[in-house]
Image (cartoon, rainbow, N blue to C red):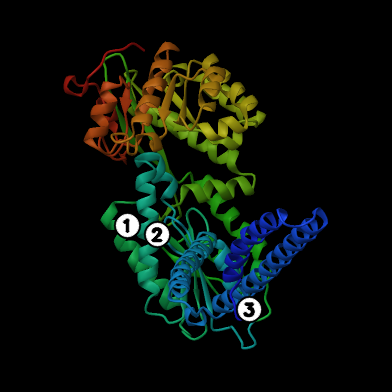
Amino acid sequence: MLNKLGSNQLLVIALLCAPLLLLQGLWLAFTSTLLTLLIILATSLLGFGLLSMLTLRLQQAERSHQEQVWCRALQLRDPTCLTTPEAQAALQQLLAHFNEAERDAHRQISELHNQATQDELTQLQNRHAFRRDMTELLQRDQDTQTATLVLIRATELGKLNAQRGFQSGDAYIKDIANIITRVVSRFPGHQVYRISGADFAVLVQPVANIPPPLLGRDLKIAFDHYQQQHELESAAYSGLTRLSSGQKIEAILARADLALARAQTETVNGWAIQQDDSVVELQGQHHWKLVLTELLEQERISFTYQPIQPMHRSMLAYNEIYTRFSSADGTVLPTDTLFAMAQRLDMVMRLEQMLVTHVMRQYRAFGSNQSRWGINLSSNLLQNSAFLIWLDRQLLNDPNTSANLVFELDEEHLERNLTGAKRVFELLRRNGSRSAICNFGKGIGSFNLFRELKPDYIKLDPALITGLEQDLTNQQFVRMIVDVSHRMGCQAIAEGVEQLGQKQLLQGMYVDGLQGYLIAKPQQLRPDISQLGLFTEDASASTGSE
């Protein structure tokens, strides 16, 4: 009987019976003895207690059963396992929330995976994905000798970042990525990666079975077209090699890197193939040593310049000088690669000496006391005593030219070697030459560097100029830099000016000079340079003193 009653019904019965039993006890109290009364009360209370205990146990049993039913329904994700419509509706809603949360979790996992293996700027696979895919390919059972690896270097990135700003550099990298993707799209089983700032890799699976020269020529044609469209000295170079089963990734990369090094010393936007695996590193160094030695002996160096527009009469005309090195056939060599290899081969001092000597010679021929020329000084020489002694002597022997040279050094490199930087800046002051910190303003540390070195010019980091019109924080930061500079007797130049709105804002901030493609593009050094870049009334929006 009790099993057929629900626990809730038993609870109701218990609650009704208790008062009746107590009333019965009170009524009997008037007609019975004290002992009888006590027995009646004890019996009533005992009965009530047993009934309550039975009710609670039945409730627990029912709850346990319901929990089992719910667990089964949840495991099966089936609301029909439940007996009541209310419970079914509740489970249906719960499952809907669970499914949504599950989808969100999968989405987040996928996003995290993409972040780990995908380049944010180009949306290509990154270096981690490249090494993973290379490892998988080399571990396959079948022969991989028909697979091809291409290393591609976008050689103009550093120059574009310096001359036009990081926004232009990013656009250039995305363009190169799109070109590579388009060229290799007709080869099955290909994958394109961005493995570093300016370096890309293409992995073509064995299924394509393509001749590497075909891929090299296709890439060169596309890069040539892009170079002409954007008026660049080059676009990108390619180094190719075949893969072989059982080889280590490092050996394959070394071959491709050697091919890339050869390509950069031959034809503009050229390509080269390296298949021989013997003494690759030595071959690469030997090749570059020959290139550098020949370049130094024949002094194959030329210059372009980019005028800086003065914003008031007291600022002398300022032209930044860019160096170009060429091979025997006149092919322009990538400057960044050239200096990197010269550093590796301990030839950077000779290269920098040739650069300074020729700039001073060109200034004596083309320059005037009404203009200053800016030279980028290699940071690798900050602690090179032999070079600094040589530079000191050169400047001392030609004080007229020295007084109009501005030696520019990158903020990042100066921070790494503050002791050497102080020595260089003191040498320049002693000889009457000027100093400039370029790419200035990366953080609060910039002001400490400014205080320690006391430069004559600071050149604002192009990253500060990009988006200046929309970024109020950047505007305040630039104003602060300019104000501090003027208080310290230093002139502030904005690099990477490309928009009219940027120019107008900078004029209002009392920046001393503007540099960028809006003002002037780099151009061939010529005798009338001394007449260019002078102050004009319509260019001025401020006054100041040198």
Question: How far across and how far down the image is residue 151, in percent?
Answer: 51, 65
Is 106 positioned to the left or the right of 508 in the image? Answer: right
Residue nearer the viewer, 505 or 406: 505
Q: Residue at x 68, y 64 (%)?
A: 52
Q: Earlier in the sequence, mark 2 or mark 1?
A: 1
Mark 2 vs mark 1, foreground winner is 1
Q: CA distance from mark 3 to mark 2?
A: 32 Å
Question: How far across and how far down the image is residue 417, in percent?
Answer: 62, 30
451 to 367, vertically: above or below: above
The answer to whether the residue labelled 3 contacts the one labelled 1, judged by CB atoms less than 8 Å apart, is no
Neighbour class for label 3 at 10 Å: few (<14), some, many (≥20)? many
State the quadrant of the C terminus. Answer: top left
Q: Secondary structure at mark 2?
A: loop
Residue 138, numbered circle: 3
Quadrant assignment, res 461: top left
Give the residue type that dot 2 points to: Val
Residue 227, numbered circle: 1
Q: Earlier in the sequence, mark 3 or mark 2?
A: 3
